[in-house]
């Protein structure tokens, strides 16, 4: 059992949980994830380790409550316990100094971006961060990312904060300007966003890393649930990823696989809600 130290609402349906997990906190590397169950017998939910404090023995998780199992995880209050937290899993982010990098976070994907941006800044990169959401209420971690970035740009679809539009709007200007062009781009968010980022950087030959979130079950390369196509080859996101070359990912295949259980999940949530 794993103690929940705190549970805060960051944005609509998005919670930040600090969980006591000393062994994971001392061994995890940026980009790795854990698989969590609130109770025995429930769906296994992969969650990126947003941050860790080895001295306190805690990890920070960002949980978007979109299905029955994630709703049960965010319902565990401070002082409560989670049944399983398994990890760290997945390959760590390949971190090096490119000089200038751009980190792009769409909506709740910004939470997954945070540990990458932090590690890239600590490796000496000059980080430009672009984060976007539907409206100001969906913008998360702006202060934390602003503190480690040379430049932080915010977009909202309704114009309630920052530039009105998608995250790709400021990125377009950045990649077109040789004086500001990044050596590498890291993008985390909805599939259409990661695809759009990869298409923007492709003509400029900018290395582009995307973090994929297919459905996962065991998280150890055994079940095949997280299979993605990268450069025409089948890869398992849980052991070969979750980060891949955005110019090689088959985003249509990923979108199809993510849609597989959408209807049954929606009807399950309706049944649970009564
Ligand atoms: P959202 O749909 O509100 O989009 C957030 C932002 O992404 C938008 O404001 C926009 O700036 C950008 N965006 C969206 N579509 C775009 C497009 N076609 N072109 C350019 N930019 C675009 O996102 P949300 O509801 O916060 O996030 C939910 C989605 O994120 C789910 O699909 C979930 O699976 C995915 N997600 C992915 C990861 C990951 O690791 N890749 C992690 C968490 C969530
Ligand atoms: Fe089973 Fe990746 S989750 S192979």
Image (cartoon, rainbow, N blue to C red):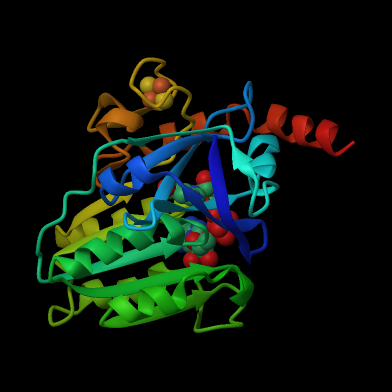
Q: Nearer the viewer, residue 67 or 57?
A: 57
Residue 46, x across and y down, in percent: 47, 37
Residue 105, x across and y down, in percent: 41, 63
> Does residue 214 appear to the left or right of 198 in the view shown?
right
Decide if residue 191 is in sight here: no
Q: Is residue 106 above or below residue 243?
A: below
> Does residue 40 appear to the left or right of 169 in the view shown?
right
Q: Is residue 165 above or below residue 94?
A: below
Decide if residue 4 is in sight here: yes
Q: Quadrant of the N terminus?
A: top right
Residue at x 19%, y 59% (from the top left corner): 203
Residue at x 15%, y 71% (from the top left corner): 125
Q: Nearer the viewer, residue 229 or 101?
A: 101
- Ligand 2 falls in quadrant: top left
Farthest right residue in view:
274
Count the marks. 0
Q: Nearer the viewer, residue 204 or 126?
A: 126
Residue 201, x across and y down, in percent: 24, 60
Q: Quadrant of the C terminus?
A: top right
> Does residue 65 appear to the left or right of 114 in the view shown?
right
Residue 108, x across and y down, in percent: 52, 58
Residue at x 39%, y 67% (from the top left corner): 168
> Does residue 148 appear to the left or right of 213 in the view shown?
left
Residue at x 76%, y 30% (from the top left corner): 268
Q: Is residue 112 above or below residue 128?
A: above
Farthest top residue in view:
222
């Amino acid at each position: 059992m794993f103690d929940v130290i705190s549970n805060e609402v960051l944005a609509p349906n998005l919670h930040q949980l600090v969980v006591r997990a000393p062994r994971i906190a001392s061994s995890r590397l940026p980009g790795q994830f854990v698989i969590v169950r609130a109770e025995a017998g429930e769906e296994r939910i992969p969650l990126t380790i947003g941050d860790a404090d080895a001295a306190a023995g805690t990890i920070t998780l960002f949980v978007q409550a979109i299905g029955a199992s994630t709703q049960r995880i965010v319902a565990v209050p401070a002082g409560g316990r989670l049944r399983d937290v398994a990890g760290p899993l997945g390959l760590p982010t390949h971190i090096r100094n490119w000089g200038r990098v751009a980190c792009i976070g769409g909506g709740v994907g910004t939470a997954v971006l945070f540990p990458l941006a932090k590690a890239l800044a600590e490796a000496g990169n000059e980080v430009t961060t672009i984060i976007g959401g539907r409206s100001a209420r969906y913008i998360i971690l702006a202060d934390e990312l602003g503190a480690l970035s040379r430049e932080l740009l915010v977009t909202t679809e309704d114009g309630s904060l920052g530039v009105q539009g998608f995250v790709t709007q400021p990125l377009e200007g950045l990649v077109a300007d040789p004086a500001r062009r990044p050596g590498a781009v890291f993008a985390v968010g909805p599939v259409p966003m990661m695809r759009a980022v990869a298409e923007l950087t492709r003509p400029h030959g900018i290395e582009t890393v995307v973090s994929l979130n297919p459905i996962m079950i065991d998280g150890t390369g055994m079940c095949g649930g997280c299979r993605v196509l990268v450069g025409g080859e089948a890869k398992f996101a849980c052991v070969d990823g979750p980060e891949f070359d955005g110019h090689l990912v088959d985003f249509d295949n990923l979108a199809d696989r993510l849609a597989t259980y959408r209807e049954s999940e929606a009807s399950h949530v309706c049944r649970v809600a009564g």
